Amino acid sequence: MPHFSYTAKTIDGKTTSGSIEAVSLQAARSALQSMKLLPEHIEEKKTADDVIDWSFEKNENPAVAPKKGATAAASAPRTYFPIVDTLRLYVGWVLAGYVLALLLGAYQLTKPLPFEIPFVLSFLYSPLILQLTLAGFLFLLFSTVHRFLGGGLWRGTVLTVLAVAALYVYRINIV
């Protein structure tokens, strides 16, 4: 879970600082507000070289601070969208459930299970479930590759096209 350093104002108006562990920037900000603190500055520390800085003004979206040595044109603020992180978490759990059902179905073909699960064999034979499993795996794989490559709109577009092409090739050959 990410660690955030913060500076905030207390109810008395005093400035305090510290660190907090939260799932996202919004969760860190909500946690500080529940501790009766008004966040002024929150900084997520990923590695020693890669620090993401969010400063809050009233009615302003958080923005990613430029890396040290970045030019003014390259340091344009980017908006932080936690939707991809939420989707990755959801897809990971769904994929784990699908894989478990597929493994139980494959085991049930070779040896009967001591208990009855009605949907296990239907999961194993369903082309839709196999496509959803592959789509979830490709989403997790390509979003991880996108992060590893440093993000960006063009890289994301190219990786999305590659993922859709992989699903299309699978569909042509299997279904």
Image (cartoon, rainbow, N blue to C red):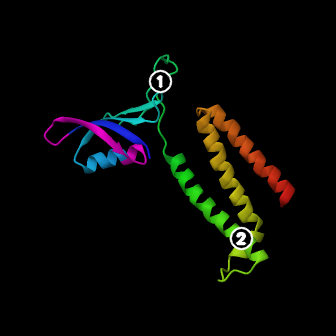
Whether residue 122 is visible:
no
Q: Quadrant of residue 145?
A: top right
Horizontally, residue 23 falls left or right of residue 131, namely: left
**Sequence order check, earlier mark of 2 and 1:** 1
Whole-percent x, y for residue 96 in the image: 61, 61
SS at mark 2 in the image: helix
Whole-percent x, y for residue 114 in the image: 66, 83
Task: Count the labels in the image.
Answer: 2
Q: Amino acid at mark 2?
A: Phe
Give the residue pinned by disc 1: 67
Whether residue 153 is visible:
yes
Please say if 97 is above or below 161. Answer: below
Give the residue pinned by disc 2: 123
Q: Are marks 2 and 1 in contact (CB under 8 Å)?
A: no
Identify which residue, 96 or 122, lies in the foreground: 96
Residue numbers of the magenta segment: 10-27
How far apart marks 2 and 1 lie (CA) works out to: 47 Å
Whether residue 20 is in magenta: the answer is yes
Residue drawn where x is 67% and y is 63% of the image: 99
Q: Quadrant of residue 64?
A: top left
